[in-house]
């Protein structure tokens, strides 16, 4: 019988290639859900942020879901993720916007 367990990568392997620390393969399509106060300019503001981090962002892919009371709006944007740094910066931009309450 042979041992079919794959070799465990050494710490230097991960340091040489930081993509191995991520569960996401780059580039990939990555949906982000943004919940914000329902305002006339919310979708426009979210679209501008997405375009800043993904120049090929397609606004026609945006999905909208109003809250049950109509006070909030869920906006799902799907961006092309190219790195962990890009996604971290995008999340920071969304969460720092005054109309945004939650980003998932």
Image (cartoon, rainbow, N blue to C red):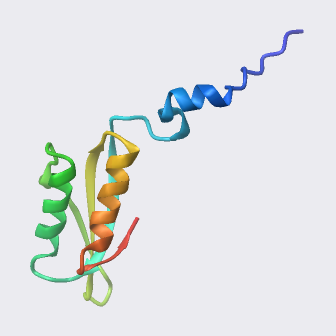
The number of numbered discs placed on residues in the rendered structure image is: 0
Foreground of the two, 72 or 83: 83
Q: Position of residue 93 (x, y in %)?
A: 27, 64
Answer left or right for 1 relative to 86: right
Foreground of the two, 46 or 14: 14
Say which residue appears at 10% left-offset and 80% top-offset. 40
Q: Measured along the vertical axis of the image, is residue 57 above or below residue 45?
A: above
Q: Measured along the vertical axis of the image, is residue 78 above or below residue 24?
A: below
Say which residue appears at 66% left-offset and 31% top-offset. 11
Determine which quarter of the picture holds residue 39. Answer: bottom left
Foreground of the two, 94 or 16: 16
Residue with the most extreme top position: 1
Say which residue appears at 34% left-offset and 61% top-offset. 91
Q: Quadrant of the N terminus?
A: top right
Q: Position of residue 9 (x, y in %)?
A: 67, 25
Q: Quadrant of the C terminus?
A: bottom left
Q: Measured along the vertical axis of the image, is residue 78 above or below residue 33?
A: above
Say which residue appears at 20% left-offset and 47% top-offset. 54
Q: Measured along the vertical axis of the image, is residue 51 above or below residue 41?
A: above
Answer left or right for 16 relative to 34: right
């Amino acid at each position: 019988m042979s041992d079919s367990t794959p070799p465990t990568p050494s710490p230097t392997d991960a340091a040489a290639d930081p993509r191995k620390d991520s569960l996401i393969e780059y580039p990939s399509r990555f949906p982000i859900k943004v919940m914000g106060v329902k305002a006339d300019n919310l979708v426009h503001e979210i679209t501008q942020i997405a375009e800043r981090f993904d120049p090929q962002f397609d606004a026609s892919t945006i999905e909208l879901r109003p809250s049950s009371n109509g006070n909030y709006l869920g906006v799902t944007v799907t961006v092309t993720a190219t790195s962990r740094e890009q996604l971290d910066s995008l999340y920071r931009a969304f969460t720092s916007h005054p109309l945004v309450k939650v980003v998932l």
